[in-house]
Amino acid sequence: MSSNIINRAQKGQFSLIAEIGVNYYDIAEKLNLSLMDAAKLMVAEAKNAGIHAVKFQSYKADTLASKHSPAYWDLDEEKTKSQYELFKKFDSFGYEEYKELSHFCGQIGIEFLSTAFDIESADYLFGLMNVYKVSSSDLNNKPFLAYQAKKNKPILLSTGASNLEEIIEAVETIRRYNSQPLTLLHCVLQYPTPFADANLNKILSLKKEFPDIIIGYSDHTKPTPDMDVCKTAYNLGAVIIEKHFTLDKSLIGNDHYHGMDPSDAKHLLEGIDFIEQIKGSGELHCLNSEKVARANARRSLVSLCRIPKGTIITEDLLTYKRPGTGISPDKIQSVLGKVASLDIEEDTVINYSMFGNLEN
């Protein structure tokens, strides 16, 4: 099986990934649903919004963070001060649950992904998805990076909080074991990311440094009404964009406060479609829609005065005016020295029939 988002990226087509993560826990509590029903509801809403893939996070707190790991997020939005305590609240899903979600995604036609945060999840996710997503936090975790690379599937690698040398080493580690398509996602490891720190020009830098690698963007800014950050990222060359996804941006904690909702996703996708429309093919030629304007807005040679039959045409007898349906001014040398075969009134558009057998 192949990855839809990778296939699209290789053809230059945009793909949007809804990072559900563990936001379904809060949706379940709000709507009085089971965790599985809440997760499936979010998947279905993503599909209905036109999103191409959904992504979860597969981890166990005990293998991800020590009990003394401090928070690095906005404590005004998420009050939990310990990474371990936060992850412990949301780590109940395992292989059977993700298998069910993967099957559900296949049924409704949206690609399933989940970030593996340990060996166990990297193993059980192998048969459930067609591309591995590696978190920014594991970019320098070479043993785990190599372990996933050896699975020989395409890889999406976020590059948040990394330096160029680290990215190069990560790419080299992956390429040592894996020749499948690789995507680097520009990312800022700050939740939420202030607009001034979005640093979207890093997308251009990644494209320059890694010309043979797909470049995308993982966004942590708060969504604007027109999704300007993500649209700008696309314009700069990010063909895959990942953004946290929620059904209620007002919910406290997790990734709701900087996530997009289905309406945001629709606006983004509509915006990308519009950008694609106005970008066009880039070919340097006159469009069919311009031909009438071209003929009428360009100029032709026009008689500056009355020219009697038999007059030898000289430059001082001519000017150039609209429309462009006669002889173009750049062809004036083909007219000079010819003899008028009829009387030409003042302000007449010149054409070759006025000079007997003179050919165009």
Image (spheres, rainbow, N blue to C red):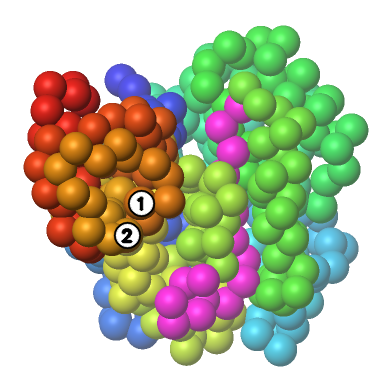
Q: In which quarter of the image is the N terminus?
A: top left
- Identify which residue is drawn at 32% across, 39% down: 313
- Counting labels gives 2
Q: In this view, does 127 lie above or below 311?
A: above
In reply to whether residue 223 is colored magenta, the answer given is yes
Compare residues 170 and 96 and report the one nearer the observer.
Answer: 170
Residue 150 locus on image (x, y percent): 61, 14
Compare residues 101 and 291 and report the one nearer the observer.
Answer: 291
Mark linked to residue 304: 2
**Residue 24 placement, left or right of 72:** left
Compare residues 85 and 52 and report the one nearer the observer.
Answer: 52
User: Residue 276: in sight, yes or no?
Assistant: no
Secondary structure state at the residue bearing disc 1: helix
Residue 317 locus on image (x, y percent): 35, 51
Q: Quadrant of the C terminus?
A: top left
In reply to whether residue 122 is colored magenta, the answer given is no
- Identify which residue is drawn at 42% across, 45% down: 315
Instruction: Please state which amino acid type lies under the numbered disc 1.
Output: Leu
Mark 2–mark 1 contact, CB under 8 Å?
yes
Q: Which stretch did the figure color magenta?
A: 213-228
Q: Is residue 101 above or below residue 261?
A: above
Residue 345 locus on image (x, y percent): 16, 58
Quick one: label 2, few (<14), some, or many (20+) residues within 10 Å?
Answer: some
Instruction: Please state which amino acid type lies under the numbered disc 2.
Output: Leu
- Identify which residue is drawn at 47% across, 72% down: 227
**Residue 54 placement, left or right of 322:** right
Mark linked to residue 317: 1
Looking at the image, is mark 2 or mark 1 earlier in the sequence?
Answer: 2
